[in-house]
Structures are given as C-alpha cells and as structure tokens.
Image (cartoon, helix red, strand yellow):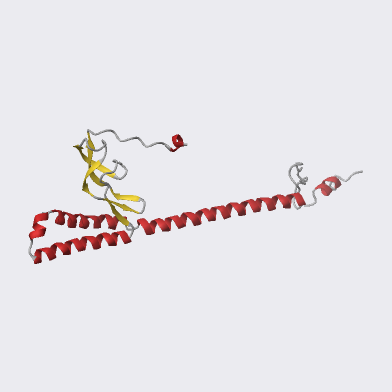
C-alpha cells in the first residue's frame, strides 16, 4: 500500500527547492551561443564600430572647436569695431568740411591742426586694418547689394546703368564679412552693364 502522507518522489525530484524548473532557452541558429567564437567576433566588431564612431565624433568636435576659436579671433571685436567706425566717420566729416581753398590759404596753425586730424584718421584706419577691419571704396564698380546700400540714383549716361558713381559713406569689412555696407549713389540712364558669363558657358 502507498502511504498517503509520503511525498511524491517525482515531484521531489523535479523541484527539490520548491522552485519551478526552467528549461534552457532555445537559441536561434543566427544567434551565436554566448562565449562562442562567433559571439566574441560579433562583440569585437561592435566594439570596433563604436570606437570608430567615437573617433569620428571627436575629430568633428576638434575641427568645429578650431573653427570657433578662429572665428572668435577674427570676429570677436565686431561690436567694438562697429562702434569705432563712428569716430572714423567723424574724422572724415571734419576733413571734408574744410574747403580745399581754405586748406591752401590757411595759416600755419590751422594747417598743423588739419594735418593732425588727417594723421589721426590714418592711424585709426591702420589700427583697424591690423585687427582685420578694412575700409573699401566701391567707386566705379558695378552695384552689389551684398556690399553696398543704394541711397539714390544719379542720371549719368557716360557709365553703364547700375554703376557706383558716388560714395556717401565708405564701407568696412571684417575678415570676409561686411561690417558695414557702403552707402552709394548708383547711375541710371546709361547702357546696361554686360552680363557676366557663367563658368559653364565658357567651357
């Protein structure tokens, strides 16, 4: 006879700790078994890919930082330079306000004063140029809205239409950027300027 109080041997063997038995998961043929050569090769390839991506990102960061540092050196004084242009303009206005005849007939004291103002203006422009700020005068050039601002039109048939014939205020560049466009008068009524030939048409 079987003792009803005796534990079932099959149950005791199947779960000696009282926890359910979990069978080993089935591994798909495409997934290499952990610890195998294929698995290690795959891990190595993944690590190499991550390393290459990290190196590429670091190189991009290095180049971007180098560009930002170069830009800060070139364009970091933009605000200051723009404020200094008011001083250059005032010096130029002071010199323009003196008639040529008055300069020639002025007494030595006035001539020395005028020369001092001219010297101050040259010194200021040279200092700006040393720091990457250059003055430009587009007189006689074809009007370019990227570098000039047209204030009015001047009837002048002797030059092609759209030519800068008067410069009200000189322009300034800082590096390769326009710090301040030149204020100009543009001709009208003359012959149209010849269109520039595209590079593709020249070939």
Position in image of residue 48 (x %, y %): 65, 53
Position in image of residue 154 (x %, y %): 19, 38
Q: For the view shown, which residue lies furthest in the front direction? A: 158
Which quadrant, please, contains the N terminus? top right
The structure residue drawn at horizontal position 61% and vertical position 52%, both measured from the top left corner, is 50
Instruction: Name which quarter of the figure residue 87 lies in.
Output: bottom left
Instruction: Name which quarter of the figure residue 103 lies in.
Output: bottom left
> In this rendering, would 107 be left or right of 175?
left
The structure residue drawn at horizontal position 36% and vertical position 54%, both measured from the top left corner, is 175
Identify which residue, 172 or 161, lies in the foreground: 161
Q: For the view shown, which residue lies furthest in the right direction? A: 1
Identify which residue, 61 or 117, lies in the foreground: 117
Residue 15 visible, this angle: yes
> In this rendering, would 148 be left or right of 110?
right
Position in image of residue 168 (x %, y %): 20, 47
Residue 98 visible, this angle: no
Q: Is residue 57 above or below residue 124?
A: above
The structure residue drawn at horizontal position 37% and vertical position 37%, both measured from the top left corner, is 196
Q: How many marks?
A: 0
Q: Is residue 152 above or below residue 105?
A: above
Identify which residue, 69 or 192, lies in the foreground: 192
Q: Is residue 83 above or below residue 24?
A: below
Position in image of residue 161 (x %, y %): 26, 35
> In this rendering, would 132 be left or right of 200?
left
> In this rendering, would 135 be left or right of 74?
left
């Amino acid at each position: 006879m079987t003792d009803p109080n005796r534990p079932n041997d099959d149950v005791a063997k199947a779960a000696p700790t009282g926890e359910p038995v979990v069978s080993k998961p089935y591994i798909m043929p495409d997934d290499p078994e952990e610890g195998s050569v294929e698995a290690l090769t795959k891990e190595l390839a993944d690590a190499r890919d991550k390393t290459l991506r990290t190196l590429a990102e670091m190189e991009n960061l290095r180049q971007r930082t180098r560009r930002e540092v170069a830009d800060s050196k070139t364009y970091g004084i933009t605000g200051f330079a723009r404020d200094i242009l008011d001083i250059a303009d005032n010096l130029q206005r002071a010199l323009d306000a003196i008639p040529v005849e008055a300069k020639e007939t002025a007494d030595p004291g006035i001539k020395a004063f005028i020369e001092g103002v001219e010297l101050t203006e040259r010194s200021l422009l040279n200092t700006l140029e040393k720091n990457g700020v250059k003055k430009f005068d587009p007189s006689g050039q074809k009007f370019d809205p990227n570098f000039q601002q047209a204030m009015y039109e001047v009837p002048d048939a002797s030059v092609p239409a759209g030519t800068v014939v008067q410069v009200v205020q000189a322009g300034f560049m800082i590096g390769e950027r326009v710090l301040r466009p030149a204020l100009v008068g543009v001709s009208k009524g003359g012959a149209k300027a010849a269109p520039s030939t595209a590079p593709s048409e020249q070939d």
